Image (cartoon, helix red, strand yellow):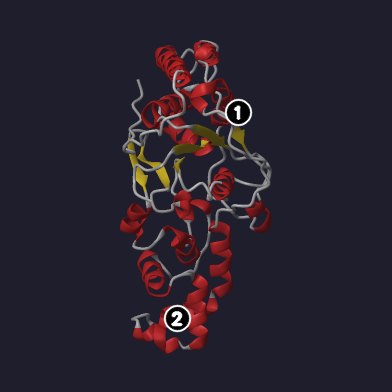
Amino acid sequence: MARNSYKTKIVLIDAHAILHRAYHALPDFSSSKGEPTGGLYGLASMLIRIITELKPDYIFACYDRPEPTFRKQVYEDYKAKRPKAEPELVAQIIRSRDIFTALHIPIFDQPGFEADDIIGTLVKKLEKNKETQIIIASGDMDTLQLVDDDRVVVFTLKKGLNDTIIYDEKGVKERYGFAPQYLIDYKGLRGDPSDNIIGVEGIGEKTATTLIQEFGEIENIYKQIKKDEQVLLAKGVKARIIEILKASEEEAIFSKTLATIRRDTNIDFKLPEQPWVKTFDSAKAEELFSELEFRTLIGRVKKLGDSAVSLKNDEENKPQVSEQEIKPLAIALWLI
């Protein structure tokens, strides 16, 4: 489907990842009551900016849960090297749900799963909606495996909160040298230090990339090894690498499984009857921002509410909803 031909635009927010990035990028703000608010401010600013620039028809927030995930249950060392979240961050993660509620953005989570798995499930549930574009807003790169042409794209942060990038399928291929679906094979081979996924010891970025470019998914690599090793040697794969792979098949497959975003979580989801703009009322957000002492954001969210009211009035005077114009996906997080 050609660009700019999507009738509906949906934004999926990885709430935990965005808040975590905002928390570490901004000063340690706090309200006069002593409540930590730096991460909350960054999250609220980003949400307003996304709504203003992208004009999504629907917005959904996806959260991690405090319970151990299925990955942690099968692999105790999953994410073991990450430092424990500071109390100030934990408090803002809990409080952040109030921001989404005030902005009338539905929240989804599921015990035993990460926000990425919820996002993957929503993408799966929406895959038949060919006239819908999905924009995943996240603070990390794990969701790139979900990218599909320009129908499912990822908006992520490169550094801090102002340096942003949108990845469609072309962008993923340009960065990694292969299609999005092979990112899980890449992690299966190379591993992922940030999640403490071991991969295959002795295989780095270059070798992992070459193997995927030549043979595709991990399972196909091992199928070829068992069928005829000479094919790998003819492609320039060193005998030492073949021996490493033969000794580490279990680790490679297990690491790939850990890196794979689930798309089958048991969440009850259907699109709301009305798009977000028709249900938004800025009063609750203004009240919350006043409580959090986000003075500069109150005016911005009020304008958002005024625009929503204006659009509602315009829509009521039309015989049917006009096709929404899809704007370029160049987003910057401009924090006042």
Q: Residues within 10 Å of mark 1 (few under 14, many from 20)?
A: few
Regarding mark 2 in the picture, which secondary structure is present there?
helix
The disc labelled 2 sits on which kind of residue?
Answer: Ile
In the picture of the structure, the residue carrying the numbered disc 2 is 242
As drawn, the label of residue 69 is none
Instruction: Between residue 237 and residue 215, name the one nearer to us.
Output: 215
Q: Which residue is mark 1?
A: 94
Quarter of the picture containing the C terminus is top left
Given residues 107 and 29, the one toward you in this image is: 107
Residue lying at 37% horizontally and 54% vertically, measured from the top left: 169
Q: Quadrant of residue 299?
A: top left
Q: Position of residue 262 (x, y in %)?
A: 59, 53
Which kind of residue does numbered mark 1 sit on? Answer: Ile
Task: Tell me residue 273's x, y (percent).
Answer: 59, 30
Find residue 207 and report its horizontal and vertical position in percent. Answer: 38, 70
Whole-angstrom CA distance, mark 1 to mark 2, is: 48 Å
Q: Is residue 253 above or below residue 318?
A: below
Against 292, residue 167 (above or below) is below
Image position of 256 (left or right of 183): right
Q: Is residue 57 visible?
A: yes
Q: Answer yes or no: do the residues labelled 1 and 2 have beta carbons within 8 Å?
A: no
Instruction: Relative to 189, say whether 235 is above or below.
Output: below
Q: Residue at x 51, y 78 (%)?
A: 222
Crowdedness near tag 2: few (<14), some (14–19) or many (≥20) residues, C-alpha within 10 Å: some
Residue 149, horizontal then vertical, whole percent: 39, 53
Looking at this view, name the residue that lies furthest to the front.
319
In the picture, measured across the screen, residue 143 lies left or right of residue 76, that is left
* Viewer-closest of 126 and 95: 126
Q: Work out whether residue 103 can be spotted.
A: no
Question: For numbered disc 1, what is the local secondary structure?
Answer: helix
Among numbered discs 1 and 2, the one appearing first in the sequence: 1
